[in-house]
Amino acid sequence: MQFANWIPALQWLRGYDRRVLLGDAVAAVIVTIMLIPQSLAYAMLAGLPPQAGLYASVAPLLLYAVFGSSRVLAVGPVAVVSLMTASAVGEVTRAMPVDYASVALTLALMSGLILLAMGALRLGFLANFLSHPVISGFISASGLLIAASQLKTLLGVSASGHTLVELLVSLGRHVGQTHALTFWVGLGTTAFLFWVRKSLKPLLLRLGLGPMAADLLAKAGPVLAIVVTSVLSWSFDWNAQGMKIVGTIPQGLPPLSMPLIDSELWQALAVPALLISVVGFVESISVGQTLAAKRRQRVEPNQELIALGASNVSAAFTGGFPVTGGFARSVVNFDAGAQTPAAGVFTAVGILLASLTLTPALYYLPQATLSATIVVAVLSLVDLGALRHAWSYARSDFTALVGTLLATLLIGVEIGLVIGVLVSLVLFLYRTSKPHIAEVGLVPGTEHFRNIKRHKVQTHPELVCLRVDENLYFANARALEDRVNEEIASHPGAKHLLLQCNSVSDIDGSALESLEAIERRLADGQIKLSLSEVKGPVMDKLRRSDLIHSLEGRIFFTNYQAFMTLLGPKAKELA
Amino acid sequence: MQFANWIPALQWLRGYDRRVLLGDAVAAVIVTIMLIPQSLAYAMLAGLPPQAGLYASVAPLLLYAVFGSSRVLAVGPVAVVSLMTASAVGEVTRAMPVDYASVALTLALMSGLILLAMGALRLGFLANFLSHPVISGFISASGLLIAASQLKTLLGVSASGHTLVELLVSLGRHVGQTHALTFWVGLGTTAFLFWVRKSLKPLLLRLGLGPMAADLLAKAGPVLAIVVTSVLSWSFDWNAQGMKIVGTIPQGLPPLSMPLIDSELWQALAVPALLISVVGFVESISVGQTLAAKRRQRVEPNQELIALGASNVSAAFTGGFPVTGGFARSVVNFDAGAQTPAAGVFTAVGILLASLTLTPALYYLPQATLSATIVVAVLSLVDLGALRHAWSYARSDFTALVGTLLATLLIGVEIGLVIGVLVSLVLFLYRTSKPHIAEVGLVPGTEHFRNIKRHKVQTHPELVCLRVDENLYFANARALEDRVNEEIASHPGAKHLLLQCNSVSDIDGSALESLEAIERRLADGQIKLSLSEVKGPVMDKLRRSDLIHSLEGRIFFTNYQAFMTLLGPKAKELA
């Protein structure tokens, strides 16, 4: 691989011109406006001071612009990864005497290094082991957990907990101390934001605005909420009335920060860092591929690992916390017309300007406003329709989805995800260990064979033909032996057993021994084993085994040939 | 299921007559003679007093005779399970203040209950997840470990350790204290037993004995070794010269014993008990099925679980330790002409008589003689040829075998087995996550399609036909997307993409989403997706999805039909 392939930026920089610049710049302005409240809110969700969210939206964007293969992905703090950060850092800081913010930096560094390593080793395919139902269940559960965790801020009470039950019990205990003003501001902002999300765009369209302008105005809802509540909070001195406000956010450039290098801490963070890396990668790659497909572009998974790894490492040294490519911001970036990652660079400059100049304006911003923006954003992650969909399509998908959802809600985000992956793997292994084996017969007038239970087909009492619908491996080899024994017992006149192998793409050593055992047992009963439609790679393997010799002359190219040759003149008696 | 089906004994008792009785009785005498030294030796291997081996060969045989579905399986202490018992009990007694023998009883009870539960829940198929390479590697490693553990007795030194390295290091440290007399007796007995095993039978045959008699005399070698060394030990008072002898074995019936009921102990023993159950079941069912096939009988896995479970529970209450169906003794039983499990009942009576009367005669028996019988017996378990065989057949089998072998030797028996199972599952998942996808073309003059890389076939630039050789599920769905993208990029004239699904037996929810994504992306590029040869169960699932509507009219019964319909008159241009 050439050097230039590692730096996708070298490609898009070549064709950069004024038209592209304009698209990127407009998109950057819009994304910057959207990112400011989001960054503050997700930093709060991660348990960090608000400026950490701004810092995490500068250097990572620059690094992604250099190394990323998606043209429009916007990197920064996202809801699910922030929740996972809060969970991991919270657990470690309760157990060890370490500084919360430093642990978050360390987590970003570790997850960056893991992503870089996965990219260098081309392990992007590992993310495939997170199945859609597991991701769906995990994201929905995270959305519910995040929403529940924001209730305390919206009510103005103190509560804590790491599972849904703990959170709700703790809230129930403190609900009597609800701060009335906070409650009304929180409720009002939430209702307003929901209204903006659901009804503002259609309303603006009806009022005659263009679809683009309507869309952008609707997206600016959170900014409006922030401005209005900040002004109210300042005017009526809400802080003096007991409402929590954001307070001082230091003005300035992102600081140079040092993650902790400590073997005990790294051990404690290893599993969370790995999970954050994988979840972040899956979220990012899904968004990236979806958007790339719309413009016929391609996203390269291993390059994305490198880019996200570099972004996270940069977050670790500039006062941030774990980041990834976010869904909402990337879509906005795409819709607003971003053409290249230069839009990301301009956005980073925008955030930088905001953190240099805007932060005093945020002093009076009620925390409840930020919580409201989080709640409204994450509830769109909760997709309970997926439950119905999975139920109607396949019970195993449904089981994996519900298992992940409940484990994440009731036990915790990390364990929930691990349980989800294990459940989906166990279900897959269980399915493959019970292979579908169909007795087939000849479709009259053709050379094709089909299941005798589903089609009108011709068979002959001297020949039993089974189609094995699964690769043969250790977990299902015995099932084939049992099925053959059954079929032979129920076909007393059988002289030939023909296995149609067109669905068998692999036969491992254990299955080979089973086939040899079947061959010997059939031979004892004067029944001959034959195979047909053995695929090339499987045939290559069989040639290295002993079975091939005892089967000599009885491996056929097509099932029809086998059928006709084995029956000979008796083929006329087909029933 | 009727009551009689749970008690296979009711079936064979019906036809019981004098001829069958004679066969059973002769076999019982021979097996009894063979079992006495074996039982003592395996008790020693398990770290228990020798009489425990005799006790474990009485009640379990009776229970198996009632519940077992194999006609000839002989149940009792076996080498690998005894090694696992020693490992598990040793670890627990080092950590907790509990009596060694009582823990062994508890382990037998727990493994019996686990087997009964697996039988009742019909979980016999779980044993299929132990692949042949894993079993082979585990048994070979156990054989080596057992042989190494006996070296200390053969040298007359004290040494300890639970892995091969620990054992050898400890032996090396004590080898200077070798007891010369013990060493020579051990070496002589071992050499004699090897000679008996390898050369005695051919010699006897050459001397004119019948094959049956020669075989039985050769099997009696260990008994001869015991008699001769016992007499020598008594005559020359070897004990007084510092040699370790068996000593007093209490005369009498198996005692009524109580396993410990203690939640902490049961927790500590849970994993070892589970592994002992599974390994014992796999060993037993393999022997049982092999021997049953020779006489056209059937062994029912779930019934075997019940029978082995009952046997182990009975061992727990009669002074024994975990047992299972043994390979050597079952083969001897079969060869000696046993017809029904009544042979097992007679064997139990024989062992009972021995433990009532013979034990004083064993007082002077050198322990080195027992170790020699163990070493010679277990080295036949070590099958290094399997390594070469696995290497030539499939690298993944080889990897699983070597992984299990090394982990068992170097880390421990339980962890070794668990690692082996995990390695083989991970390798399987890895293989299925990289599906074989072949571009296929029409074999001229037929209706069959084959890989364009392996056969001379006809194709058309407007139609790309891919055969997917794997079930589509979450771990490989993305690989299909990537492959389709590649193929489309390299076939710029393509107007149709045809997926031949004859090897696809399942499409899960994640793969369905991938197919939908492929369909959308192809449609964006004016390429139509079609499917062919979709199997019945997969079609049933697709009918419940949205994909079926967008594909309407483009799912074909055969690939040939699809090919001809999609190309239409252009089929004449086939190259």
Image: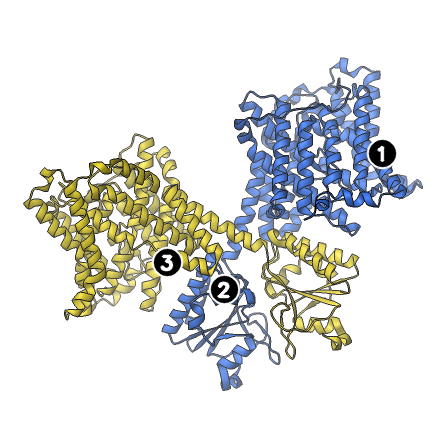
Chain colours: A blue, B yellow
Return the mark for residue B385. Answer: 3
Q: Position of residue A99 (x, y in %)?
A: 61, 21
Instruction: From the top left corner, tell me how far across and down residue A208 is, in percent.
Output: 94, 41
* Count of labels in the image: 3
In the rendered structure, which amino acid carries the disc numbered 3? Gly
As helix, strand or loop, the secondary structure at mark 2 comes to helix
Residue type at numbered disc 2: Lys
Q: Secondary structure at mark 1?
A: helix
- Residue B334 marker: none
- Residue nearest the observer in this picture, B429 or A15: A15
**On the picture, is B142 further left or further right than B493?**
left
Secondary element under disc 3, as helix, strand or loop, is helix
Query: On residue A541, which mark appears?
Result: 2
Q: Residue furthest left?
A: B235
Indicate which disc residue A29 carries.
1
Say above or below: B377 vs A54. Answer: below
